Image (spheres, rainbow, N blue to C red):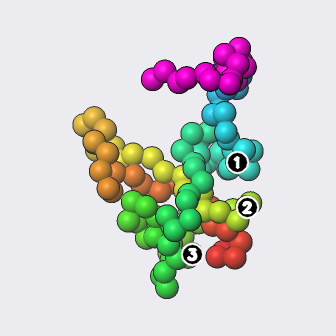
């Protein structure tokens, strides 16, 4: 994909990409300094849009449809006022990764805002 550089410096964009590659982190990863290593491995966590994670009487329902009970060890306290979902694609033994579908992701961790924790 080619992005137009109207009003932006190509040198600045190149420097940003080079820095991201050198440090192995995405350009806009302000949260990875508090994501725990066992949850994200520097690539599996993302902040969720409002309403993407729903709180129910039994726990938290993530976008894949999986329900994480309140006492689940994968539920962690967020360091901001947002949900952050750490997830990976399911892998079937002896097969290649499945094509993404509604339930293709499994939860590694769910960071929950303090008000919900």
Check disc 1 and report the residue beneath it.
Answer: 31
Residue 7 falls in image quadrant: top right
Q: Secondary structure at mark 3?
A: loop
N-terminal of the pair, mark 3 or mark 2, is 3
> Farthest left residue?
95
Identify the residue at image location x=46%, y=70%. Answer: 61
Alpha-carbon distance for marks 2 and 1?
Answer: 9 Å
**Residue 43 image label:** none
N-terminal of the pair, mark 2 or mark 1, is 1
Q: Secondary structure at mark 1?
A: loop
Q: Is residue 68 visible?
A: no
N-terminal of the pair, mark 1 or mark 3, is 1
Query: x and y percent of residue 111 in the render?
Result: 62, 61
> Farthest top residue?
11
Check disc 2 and report the residue beneath it.
Answer: 80
- Bin the neighbour count of mark 2 within 10 Å (Cα to Cα): few under 14, some 14-19, many 20 and up: few
Identify the residue at image location x=49%, y=85%. Answer: 57
The answer to whether marks 2 and 1 mark residues whose Cβ atoms lie closer than 8 Å is: yes
> Farthest bottom residue?
57
Foreground pick, 112 / 27: 27
In this rendering, position of residue 64 left or right of residue 6: left
Check disc 3 and report the residue beneath it.
Answer: 71
Query: x and y percent of residue 52 in the render?
Result: 49, 64
Mark 3 or mark 2: which is in front?
Answer: 2
- Residues in magenta? 1-17
Foreground pick, 41 / 18: 18
């Amino acid at each position: 994909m080619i992005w137009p550089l109207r009003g932006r410096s190509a040198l600045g964009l190149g420097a940003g990409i080079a820095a991201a590659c050198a440090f192995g982190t995405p350009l806009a990863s302000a949260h990875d300094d508090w994501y725990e290593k066992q949850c994200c491995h520097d690539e599996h966590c993302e902040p969720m849009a409002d309403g993407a994670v729903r709180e129910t009487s039994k726990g938290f329902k993530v976008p894949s449809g999986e329900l994480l009970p309140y006492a689940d060890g994968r539920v962690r306290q967020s360091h901001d006022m947002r949900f952050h979902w750490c997830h990976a694609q399911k892998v079937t033994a002896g097969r290649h990764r499945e094509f993404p579908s509604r339930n293709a992701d499994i939860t590694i961790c769910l960071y929950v805002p303090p008000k919900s924790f």
